[in-house]
Image: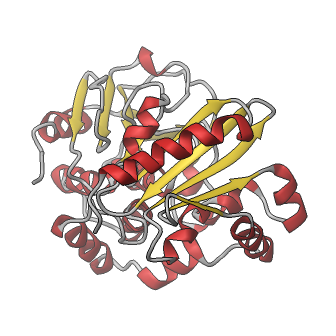
Amino acid sequence: MTDSTGLIPIRDALARGQRFLLTSHARPDGDSIGSQVALALALQALGKTVRIVNRDPAPAPYLAFPGVELIEVAAAVDGAFDAAIVLECGELSRPDVAGLDRYPVVNIDHHTGNTGYGALNWYDPSAAACAEMVLDLVDALGVPLTRAMATGLYVAILTDTGSFRHANITARTFDACRRTAAAGVDAAAVARQVFDSSSVGKLKLMGALLGGMRLEAGDRLAVLSLDDEMLRTSGATRDDTEGLVNLPFAAREVRAVAFFKVEGPDEVRVSLRSKGAVDVRAVAVRHGGGGHPNAAGFSVAGTYESVRGRIVSEVADAIALSPEP
Ligand SMILES: [Mn+2]
């Protein structure tokens, strides 16, 4: 089911306006980067002035894709814009960019629990990636899909579906991918660039992470932990940790993964992933985070040792609550 009730007013506002600010969530992922770039290029094709401002830079593998160079990194925005278009954000605090509330906000998102913070809101949790919505918007604006726009959309869908593994994939997802291929996207080259373009340091980090992996809940929950010392020893960077949360899913028994990244003496970032009906979003929401049923995250105050037990038991409960596949 596609919910497009919010689309038409947004199309009209974008067709009318001339100067737009685009943003998305801090610590951007493939969907936030790809969706922003695709929409920015489409608006430019209509002769609009566009700036993309994000709190954090794009992860290194994405810098190779067209349009990503348009992204500016800043903690605040000012200047004259007809609207601030916020993509991929359940709440207006997610971009962590000051000044957005000075503009009419256009909210385009697919996260369950979106708070409807915009002057215009289009919220469609049936979309596997925000990029599926952006494609509908590009079509509604009457902009021909270029290869550069399509590359952004494909990067977004490829990554936001966990390489076509998550439970949110529909026929619409493949329709969108078909459109991107028809526009000239080389799917194999994109996948190599996103997943297989990192360093030997990342490979060594994978070994260290899996070497320290603990299995809980009868091997159904894999627990990974990372600190700066492991990065240093393996010669990896923080960027290299992207996607490693999915490694334990190679085993059939593993139904959920909890990945603890020590961010400082009193802060731990927790990434949760799951297969099928195991809802890890509910755990993340309880800790002030968010995401999707199969992919969610949050930050928690404390040391790894102090927070680990409680979170592991909550994820184990989420596994116990869902039927065995
Ligand atoms: Mn997304």
Q: In percent of the image, x 44 and y 77: which residue is there?
A: 252
Query: Is residue 321 something that shows in the picture?
Result: yes
Instruction: Give the x, y percent position of residue 208.
Output: 77, 68
Residue nearest the viewer, comparing 18 with 65: 65
Residue 110 vs 59, above or below: the answer is: above
Residue nearest the viewer, comparing 78 with 273: 273
Residue 321 vs 99, above or below: the answer is: below
Quadrant in which the N terminus appears: bottom left
Instruction: Give the x, y percent position of residue 98.
Output: 55, 20
Is 121 on the left or on the right of 307, as rendered? left
Query: Is residue 45 something that shows in the picture?
Result: no
Instruction: Give the x, y percent position of residue 75.
Output: 63, 28
Instruction: Give the x, y percent position of residue 320.
Output: 36, 52
Quadrant in which the C terminus appears: bottom left
Residue 196 vs 140, above or below: the answer is: below
Query: Which residue sits furthest top?
Result: 102
Residue 26 vs 255, above or below: the answer is: above
Q: In percent of the image, x 87 and y 54: which residue is there?
A: 229
